[in-house]
């Protein structure tokens, strides 16, 4: 209390310290309009154009990923829906149970479940007209015949409960009851299509049932039943189930189970923990579990989903991403998903960040076309010929020249006049490089697909599919493909194919034949030689060899027809040759890195930063930190108070005496002040009226320092006193800031000592 | 109602002849059953012409606020059903009480009771005409002179003590306070002396202790659940003849086998009935198959009653699955219908020669198989769990010796070992992993994680040439956001339990490990770590 009283005492000195951080923030915004790391060689308006290109590229990619995820989850969605629809149906329930159970569907999706839930709710919401039309999304997804049958039941009413609005049982019951009663009132009044709800009646709050009373819901449902029989199911979706209060939930389940005969409630739990170990079984008591009939549905999750997404987005012949992921990004993606968390959201974030970073590069304007944001090539030429675009054009030419010189074997010898190249020629060159890059990527994907097919075939026949024998590293196999480092595996596959029996060979050939047959027409045309080769091999394979292969009774190995090994060897050799010609590195060719993120390091600090360590490092090495963050702050070589405090607590002691610390702090500050004073005198002597070079953090202190300096001449003693108080105030503030950030801790052992909680790495 | 005869007779006598104001029924084994019995008894009593009873059943869990309790009690005592179309109004009392609330305090509740008694007296009660209350009305008209007795039954009464502690005493003294003829009956699985309000504030109740069911009573009760009529609807999971009346004798035998196998673990009749409901369709299936094949061959359908030989064969075949059913169904690892679906016996198992019949192994339904714990967790989560296990089992003092990796590491560790030997001689100390996990602060977890990662994970990381000092890379890795997020995720999955309140920000949060030694061991094996080397008291 005394300190509070001191605050009101007008005789005490009051030091006002400006909240520096706040002012810094505002200044940063003003001084720091755009992030343009390559502005020296950018085209005018390049930033916006690239952002537009990025949006387009990302949208295509994101849509693809979403459709993959949706396809992955489709069976799950129909399972969940059928569980909900059949919750009270008699043909899936057991007779003679001691008491009815409350149906609960636990949807466990550790990698994110937004689309699953929304799909489920879409289907549940569908009205009879939609079903008859058969064109809705839900109908497509619900292929199951039984499901469509069960859809002929009445539509369900869905309500959603979120943990934030249900901190206790009262909130939970209120949300549950009002969710049905009031929501349906509202939709009924709006003339919403769908369920006929009983008309809202005016309830007198004091004379009627409480709005958290389940009997209110019973009364409402009874009225609903008079309107339509059989009544709809009442589906309760509990979002973020783990964050609900467990005790309140148990009571809610008990209350609801008392009314099963009158309320067909179905609970859908959205769990983010894996199905095993089950959260429900660890958190809930047995008596609660005994009231429920839990059907657990586990969404595909983990590394498998990540592999599926990456493979189908970047390694699928049927889809051409605008930008291909390079080895560095892919490495990070794989490392992050195996090490930290493998979720769809994580993959999306990583790919999006990689795309964003990729579009920093000025040349990424060429990702989609060569028009540079104009409508035609002519306009683009005009734009490039303008003087502002010179730097861009110059760097482009340098790059093309450099690429052409360094290409192995002179793959690309463009027929243009290098002494006096026209802009149009350059754009043509970029265009052909784009086509070339697309073809290259397409061929790589084709090779990859064939290799995957053969590997899968080998695995299904019970052979090893890779030279290392580890099948589970298939995600890492992708980086090998991108780097073009799979020749070992390719040769292994070729060797394995050579040893196949006639029957297996026949199967393999037909699988390959089907694959090439299913390609798009233009690809099929390109792969004509491969198809011919496969058909020829199929013809060569003697039919009688297929029948003769009975396992030898003595050796238990199948007898091999003499005509088969040469054909197998032939196919094996062809396969090796084919795969090696197809799976090549993508980081070759003219301007390859426009369409490939290449070896650009992934900005992992954005996704997975280490804030604590960064602050400690900043405090320990303030000058280095400030230097590296020059854009953000330019305090003119003056360290902030926390930095000084951080520096001065360097001595490796466990307990720090606060007074000693204060002494060293004030010493450091004194040095700083003298430095400032010297600088001011120098500027005064020069009589330059220009603005101070110091901005940012220094600014807050500088006026004070200046005035001090002037006043010092005539009132130095009073000033000295004031300065001391200010130092003290600043020290206390810095101390508390460090305390808030958790770098020091108070101890009860010694009142004037604090404990240091972080120790720097010895330098 | 088998096995509850004492309770029934005691109760009906009590309420017919002499009614104490407060009755306490204690049933430690199955409170649901006793409540059901009491409900039936009261219903029977109501039917009798010479008594006039009105009853209200309230539940200590469902009525979690006083208002809910008052509303439910008054509506039920007045046989009033709130209707949606009439605005869900509560029972409003006779006209002289119009505008008065009966549910905003105990006082108004007492007023409500008095109003109810008065209205009963002056036959003002008008059931709102939609239920079959005409009989009650007629009776009310007949017995104008007889006092109507009210009964308030509170199930799960022990929960009142937590939710509404102020209400326990008034409820036990309701007759005295309201000055009406009302009896309060508490049903609870807690003994009265454990929930008795202090200072003798409540009168001593008429105490009824419900004894657990005897074996025979339990079997009788279970077999009484056998449906009189076979279920009419067809079902995908069981044969329509599963509950044929002729199979009843076999069901009784089945129940006695079930009881003899399961009774050491549970004697709850509900649980036994649940297991029986899940197991019976599979158990009887071979018989039905056999009958079907006989019919298919063109013979007359044989009777359902199996021969003694077939019964013994069935029992012998299925004996191992009883335990499996108990293990899966008692902790509700799966539901009865899922279990019944997953455990259909092989077709025509009775047609095999006795020794060649395929064994009937119990299977778990598909939805709970799923990927194991080891597969679903990420690599870092496994390391964190392991670090949490070590932090929970090793004493904090031993960390320096166990994990300190300085130049004098060997000396320190050996000292640790020698001390352990000394401790063994002096007194038998129980290992911490048998005593349960200790709580540890987050900082300690992260520090141990750092050691584990430095020694076991450093090679698998992507190269980072910017870290030059030994240990700097690990230091950076363990302070990353993803690690903290992972700890919180594990806490939300209850694999690590948070022991400090989540809203306390000023100190490092504390946790407790949630996995067993066996799980930790298999995690460690998967990561290539020798767990016993890192434990202060190895197994």
Image (cartoon, rainbow, N blue to C red):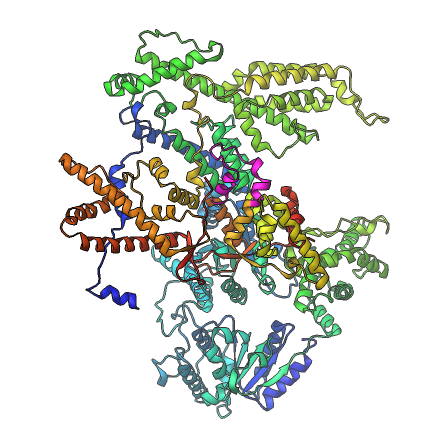
Question: Residue at image x 77%, y 54%?
Answer: B286
Query: Residue B160 at what x, y percent from top left?
Result: 51, 75
B457 within the magenta span:
yes
Query: In the current view of this chain or complex, which residue is farthest to the bottom?
Result: B145
Query: Residue B476 at what x, y percent from top left?
Result: 48, 41
Question: Residue at image x 34%, y 58%?
Answer: A189
Query: Quarter of the image holding residue B339?
Result: bottom right
Left or right: A609 as drawn, with respect to A576: left
B131 within the magenta span:
no
Q: Nearer the viewer, residue A482 or B7?
A: A482
Query: Residue A15 at what x, y percent from top left?
Result: 23, 56
In what quadrant of the picture does the N terminus of chain B appear? bottom right
Left or right: A636 as drawn, with respect to B426: left
Relative height, residue A139 to residue A105 (above, below): above
Relative height, residue A478 to residue A229 (above, below): above
Number of marks drawn:
0
Q: Nearer the viewer, residue B100 or B202?
A: B202
Q: Nearer the viewer, residue B413 or A358?
A: B413
The range drawn in magenta is B451-479
Question: Residue at image x 56%, y 33%?
Answer: A475
Q: Is residue A479 visible?
A: yes
Query: Residue A59 at what x, y percent from top left?
Result: 40, 34
Q: Is residue B150 visible?
A: no
């Amino acid at each position: 209390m005394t300190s509070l009283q001191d605050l009101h005492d007008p005789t005490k000195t009051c030091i006002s310290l400006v909240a520096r951080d706040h002012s810094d923030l505002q200044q940063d915004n003003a001084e720091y309009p755009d992030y343009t790391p390559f502005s020296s060689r950018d085209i005018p308006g390049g930033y916006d154009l690239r952002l537009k290109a990025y949006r387009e590229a990302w949208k295509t990619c994101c849509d693809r990923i979403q459709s993959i995820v949706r396809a992955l989850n489709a069976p799950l969605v129909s399972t969940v829906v059928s569980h909900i629809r059949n919750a009270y149906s008699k043909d899936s329930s057991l007779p003679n149970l001691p008491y009815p159970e409350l149906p609960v569907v636990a949807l466990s999706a550790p990698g994110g479940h937004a689309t699953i839930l929304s799909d489920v709710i879409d289907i549940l919401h569908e009205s009879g007209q939609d079903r008859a039309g058969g064109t809705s999304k839900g109908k497509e997804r619900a292929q199951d015949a039984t499901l469509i049958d069960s859809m002929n039941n009445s539509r369900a009413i869905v309500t959603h409960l979120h943990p934030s609005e249900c901190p206790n049982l009262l909130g939970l019951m209120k949300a549950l009851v009002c969710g049905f009663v009031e929501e349906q009132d509202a939709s009924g009044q709006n003339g919403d299509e769908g369920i006929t709800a009983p008309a809202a009646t005016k309830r007198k709050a004091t004379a009627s049932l409480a709005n958290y009373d389940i009997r209110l819901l019973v009364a409402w449902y009874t009225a609903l039943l008079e309107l339509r029989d059989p009544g709809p199911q009442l589906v309760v979706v509990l979002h973020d189930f783990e964050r609900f209060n467990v005790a309140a939930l148990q009571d809610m389940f008990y209350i609801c189970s008392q009314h099963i005969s009158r309320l067909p409630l179905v609970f859908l739990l959205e769990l983010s923990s894996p199905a095993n170990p089950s959260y429900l079984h660890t958190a809930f008591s047995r008596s609660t579990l005994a009231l429920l009939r839990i059907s657990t549905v586990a969404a595909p999750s983990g590394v498998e989903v990540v592999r599926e997404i990456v493979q189908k987005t970047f390694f699928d012949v049927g889809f051409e991403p605008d930008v291909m992921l390079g080895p560095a990004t892919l490495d990070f993606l794989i490392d992050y998903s195996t090490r930290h968390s493998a979720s769809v959201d994580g993959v999306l974030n990583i790919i999006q960040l990689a795309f964003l970073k990729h579009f920093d590069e000025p040349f990424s304007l060429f990702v989609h076309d060569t028009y540079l944001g104009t409508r035609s090539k002519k306009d683009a030429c005009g734009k490039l010929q303008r003087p502002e675009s010179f730097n861009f054009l110059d760097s482009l030419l340098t790059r093309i020249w450099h690429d052409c010189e360094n290409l192995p074997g002179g793959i690309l010898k463009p027929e243009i006049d290098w002494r006096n190249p026209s802009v149009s020629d350059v754009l043509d060159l970029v265009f052909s490089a784009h086509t070339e890059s697309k073809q290259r990527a397409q061929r790589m994907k084709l090779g990859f697909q064939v290799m995957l097919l053969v590997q899968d075939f080998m695995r299904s026949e019970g052979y090893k599919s890779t030279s290392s024998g580890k099948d589970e590293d298939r995600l890492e196999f992708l980086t090998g493909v991108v780097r073009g480092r799979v020749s070992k595996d390719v040769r292994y596959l070729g060797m394995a194919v050579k040893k196949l029996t006639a029957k297996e060979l026949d199967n393999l050939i037909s699988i390959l034949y089907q694959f090439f047959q299913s390609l798009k027409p233009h690809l099929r045309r390109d792969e004509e030689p491969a198809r011919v080769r496969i058909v020829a091999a199929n013809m060569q394979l003697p039919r009688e060899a297929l029948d003769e292969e009975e396992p030898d009774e003595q050796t238990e190995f199948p007898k091999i027809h003499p005509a088969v090994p040469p054909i197998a060897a032939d196919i094996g050799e062809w396969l090796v040759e084919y795969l090696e010609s197809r799976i090549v590195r993508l980081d070759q060719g003219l301007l390859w890195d426009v369409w490939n993120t290449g070896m650009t390091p992934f900005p992992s600090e954005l996704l997975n930063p280490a804030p604590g360590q960064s602050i400690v490092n900043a405090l320990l090495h303030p000058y280095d930190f400030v230097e590296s963050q020059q854009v953000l702050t330019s305090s003119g070589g003056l360290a902030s108070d926390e930095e000084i405090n951080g520096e001065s607590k360097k001595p490796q002691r466990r307990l720090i005496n606060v007074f000693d610390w204060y002494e060293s702090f004030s010493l450091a500050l004194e040095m700083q002040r003298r430095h400032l004073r010297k600088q001011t005198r120098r500027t005064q002597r020069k009589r330059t009226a220009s603005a101070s070079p110091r901005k940012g953090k220094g600014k807050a202190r500088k006026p004070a320092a200046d005035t001090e300096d002037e006043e010092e001449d005539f009132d130095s003693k009073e000033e000295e006193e004031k300065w001391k108080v200010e130092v003290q105030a600043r020290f206390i503030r810095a101390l508390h800031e460090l305390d808030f950030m958790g770098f020091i801790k108070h101890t009860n052992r010694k009142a004037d000592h604090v404990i240091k909680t972080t120790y720097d790495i010895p330098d | 109602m088998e096995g509850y005869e004492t309770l029934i007779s005691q109760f009906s006598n009590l309420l017919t002849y002499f009614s104490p104001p407060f009755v306490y029924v204690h049933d430690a084994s199955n409170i649901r059953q006793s409540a059901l019995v009491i409900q039936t008894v009261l219903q029977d009593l109501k039917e009798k012409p010479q008594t006039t009873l009105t009853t209200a059943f309230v539940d200590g869990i469902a009525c979690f606020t006083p208002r809910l309790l008052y509303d439910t009690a008054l509506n039920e005592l007045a046989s009033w059903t709130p209707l949606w179309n009439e605005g869900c109004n509560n029972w409003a009392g006779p006209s002289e009480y119009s505008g008065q609330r009966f549910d905003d305090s105990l006082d108004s509740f007492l007023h409500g009771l008095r109003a109810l008694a008065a209205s009963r007296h002056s036959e003002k009660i008008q059931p709102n005409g939609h239920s079959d209350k005409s009989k009650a009305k007629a009776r009310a008209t007949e017995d104008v002179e007889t006092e109507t007795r009210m009964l308030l039954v509170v199930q799960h009464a022990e929960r009142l003590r937590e939710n509404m502690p102020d209400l326990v005493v008034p409820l036990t003294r309701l007759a005295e306070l309201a000055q009406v003829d009302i009896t309060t009956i508490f049903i609870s699985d807690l003994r009265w002396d454990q929930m008795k309000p202090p200072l003798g504030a409540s009168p001593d109740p008429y105490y009824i202790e419900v004894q657990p069911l005897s074996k025979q009573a339990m079997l009788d009760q279970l077999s009484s659940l056998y449906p009189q009529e076979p279920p009419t609807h067809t079902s995908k999971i069981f044969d329509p003849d599963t509950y044929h009346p002729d199979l009843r004798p076999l069901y009784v035998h089945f129940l006695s086998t079930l009881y003899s196998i399961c009774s050491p673990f549970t004697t709850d009749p509900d649980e036994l009935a649940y297991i029986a409901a899940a197991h019976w369709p599979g158990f009887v299936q071979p018989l039905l198959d056999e009958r079907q094949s006989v019919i298919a061959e063109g013979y007359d359908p044989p009777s359902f009653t199996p021969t003694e030989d077939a019964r013994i064969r069935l029992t012998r075949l299925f004996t191992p699955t009883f335990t499996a059913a108990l293990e899966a169904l008692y902790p509700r690892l799966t539901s009865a219908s899922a279990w019944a679906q997953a455990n259909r016996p092989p077709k025509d198992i009775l047609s095999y020669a006795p020794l060649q019949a395929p064994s009937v192994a119990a299977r778990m339904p598909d939805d709970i198989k799923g990927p194991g714990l080891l597969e679903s967790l990420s690599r870092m989560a496994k390391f964190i769990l392991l670090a949490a296990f070590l932090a929970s089992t090793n004493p904090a003092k031993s960390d320096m010796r166990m994990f300190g990796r300085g130049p004098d590491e060997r000396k320190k560790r050996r000292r640790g070992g020698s001390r352990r030997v000394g401790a063994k001689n002096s007194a038998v100390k129980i290992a911490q992993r048998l005593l349960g996990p200790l709580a540890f602060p987050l900082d300690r977890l992260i520090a141990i994680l750092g050691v584990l990662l430095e020694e076991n994970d450093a090679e698998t990381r992507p190269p980072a040439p910017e870290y030059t000092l030994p240990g700097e890379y690990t230091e950076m890795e363990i302070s990353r956001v993803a690690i903290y997020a992972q700890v919180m995720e594990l806490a939300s999955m209850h694999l690590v339990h948070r022991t400090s309140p989540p809203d306390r920000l000023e100190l490092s949060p504390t946790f407790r490990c949630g996995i067993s030694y066996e799980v930790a061991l298999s995690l460690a094996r998967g990561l290539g770590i020798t767990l016993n080397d890192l434990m202060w008291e190895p197994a």
